[in-house]
Image: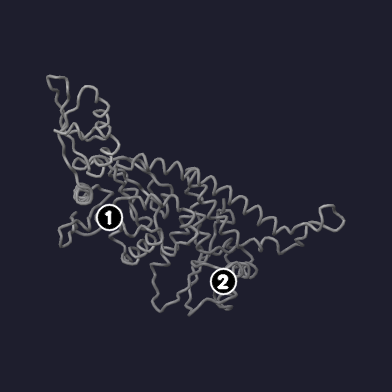
């Protein structure tokens, strides 16, 4: 898979300001992305423009300045914090005599390093192939592309470029078929846990989602102060006393200017988001660009059709704020809308669980029933134990069993539809 570090580790960064507001946080995030890809930064070139130049994206003078910096510093790669066209990349490479990569290629490189599961690797490869498909011409401008000839039995033959495109299409189709199989398995898993509410952690990359996930579930998901540390989703079952079992899922972090074909390639993974009952939007409370990043996450949620799902804001990293204690912010209906906590120190986790309990009870009404099961209905007793819905149990003299069950009303109706005799056992 594509990895920009194979071209060398010495990089010159280029960031263009297209507005009067020079947001230094954008450059800081760009530099963090580059460091997350395993590269070292030699220099950062900035300038202001009203619109991109069609030939070099930057002006010709700035392009020559970049080429001069590459020559002096012996940089091996130039990385733009913007989306470049194939022609712009080719022109810049001819001028700088080194590899030129745009923001999309940089993110793809990080993804290729982070993917661990079979599905994650397939999704990254599909995204990379879609990206490379528009850049095949560059590889064959140095030679005659005609493979065949009149004297050969196969006829004039096809060009090398056409061959590459055909192979690329075939590989993409193969990956799509494999991902379809994985998605069918995912769908079966979602169906099996349809009665259990799913809560997803979403948020900007490096906001602390995995740290919070580990703190709540005692899992061991990789945590690092890098962008896109988590790429493959992780699901864990969790029991909340007032609710019962839920499924908590950690997902890939979002980022500004996330390429559309990346979202498309990770559609099957992000479908977990669409099936969720509640989203926990993790926010770095110490971030100076907090509102910009919240809006960036909301924009991605709109793109994946998950903006209709109820969301609870989780303001993380309050341990880095002065004299700040965990708390729950509520709206006029007394519903929790924001929880302030520190996932690193586990401060405020109990408040988060309280907020989750309140929201889930409001959205998924919990009911209690008394049941009297005859001896031959032991299968139903076992089923309620599997659902962890039994609060009390006692035996009667005639051999029957009395149960006090606590269960979400939606789950109860689903059971009654499947186990028609259940209503006969109500006391």
> Residue 155 has which mark?
none
Sequence order check, earlier mark of 1 and 2: 2
> Residue 66 has which mark?
2
Image location (x, y in percent) of residue 315: 26, 57
Q: Secondary structure at mark 2?
A: helix
Quadrant of residue 19 in the image? bottom left
User: Would residue 222 be visible to someone looking at this image?
Assistant: yes
Image location (x, y in percent) of residue 264: 48, 57
Image location (x, y in percent) of residue 375: 21, 22
Q: Residue furthest right?
A: 151
Residue beneath the point at 50% across and 71% down = 45
Q: CA distance from mark 1 to mark 2?
A: 39 Å
Residue beneath the point at 15% across and 60% down = 333
> Residue 316 has which mark?
1
Q: Secondary structure at mark 1?
A: strand
Q: Look at the image and tell me in which quarter the C terminus lies.
A: top left
Q: Is residue 216 above or below residue 329?
A: above
Q: Is residue 64 above or below residue 379?
A: below
Quadrant of residue 93 in the image? bottom right
Q: Nearer the viewer, residue 291 or 200?
A: 200
Q: Nearer the viewer, residue 374 or 133?
A: 374
Horizontally, is 160 left or right of 302 in the view?
right
Q: Nearer the viewer, residue 65 or 409?
A: 409
Quadrant of residue 78 in the image? bottom right
- Decide: marks 1, 2 in contact (CB < 8 A)? no
Image location (x, y in percent) of residue 367: 17, 42
User: Would residue 347 be visible to someone looking at this image?
Assistant: no
Residue beneath the point at 48% across and 47% down = 120
């Amino acid at each position: 898979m594509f990895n920009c570090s194979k071209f060398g580790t010495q990089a010159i960064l280029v960031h263009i300001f297209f507005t009067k507001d020079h947001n230094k946080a954008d450059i800081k995030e760009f530099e963090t992305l580059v460091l997350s890809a395993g590269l070292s930064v030699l220099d950062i070139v900035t300038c202001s423009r009203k619109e991109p130049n069609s030939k070099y994206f930057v002006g010709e003078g700035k392009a020559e300045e970049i080429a001069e910096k590459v020559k002096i510093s012996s940089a091996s790669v130039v990385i733009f914090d913007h989306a470049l066209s194939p022609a712009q990349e080719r022109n810049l490479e001819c001028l700088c005599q080194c590899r030129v990569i745009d923001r999309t290629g940089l993110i793809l490189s990080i993804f290729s390093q982070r993917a661990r599961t079979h599905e994650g690797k397939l999704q990254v490869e599909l995204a990379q192939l879609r990206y490379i498909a528009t850049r095949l011409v560059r590889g064959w401008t140095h030679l005659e592309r005609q493979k065949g000839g009149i004297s050969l039995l196969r006829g004039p033959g096809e060009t090398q470029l056409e061959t590459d495109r055909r192979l690329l299409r075939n590989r993409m189709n193969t990956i799509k078929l494999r991902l379809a199989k994985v998605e069918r398995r995912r769908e079966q898993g979602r169906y099996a846990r349809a009665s259990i509410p799913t809560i997803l952690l979403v948020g900007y990359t490096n906001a602390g989602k995995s740290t919070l996930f580990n703190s709540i579930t005692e899992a061991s998901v990789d945590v690092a102060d890098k962008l896109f540390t988590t790429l493959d989703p992780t699901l864990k079952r969790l029991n909340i006393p007032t609710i019962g079992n839920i499924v908590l899922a950690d997902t890939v972090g979002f980022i500004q200017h996330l390429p559309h074909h990346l979202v498309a390639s990770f559609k099957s993974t992000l479908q977990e988001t669409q099936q969720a009952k509640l989203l926990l939007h993790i926010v770095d409370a110490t971030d100076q660009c907090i509102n910009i990043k919240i809006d960036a996450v909301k924009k991605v949620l709109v793109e994946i059709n998950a903006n209709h799902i109820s969301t609870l804001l989780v303001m993380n990293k309050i341990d880095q704020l002065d004299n700040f204690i965990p708390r729950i912010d509520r709206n006029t209906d007394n519903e929790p809308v924001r929880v302030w906590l520190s996932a690193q120190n586990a401060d405020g986790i109990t408040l988060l669980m309280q907020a989750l309990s309140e929201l889930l009870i409001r959205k998924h009404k919990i009911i209690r029933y008394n049941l009297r099961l005859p001896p031959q209905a032991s299968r139903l007793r076992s089923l309620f134990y599997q659902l962890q819905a039994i609060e009390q149990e006692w035996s009667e003299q005639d051999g029957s069993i009395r149960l006090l069950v606590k269960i979400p009303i939606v789950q109860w109706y689903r059971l009654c539809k499947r186990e028609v005799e259940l209503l006969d056992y109500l006391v």
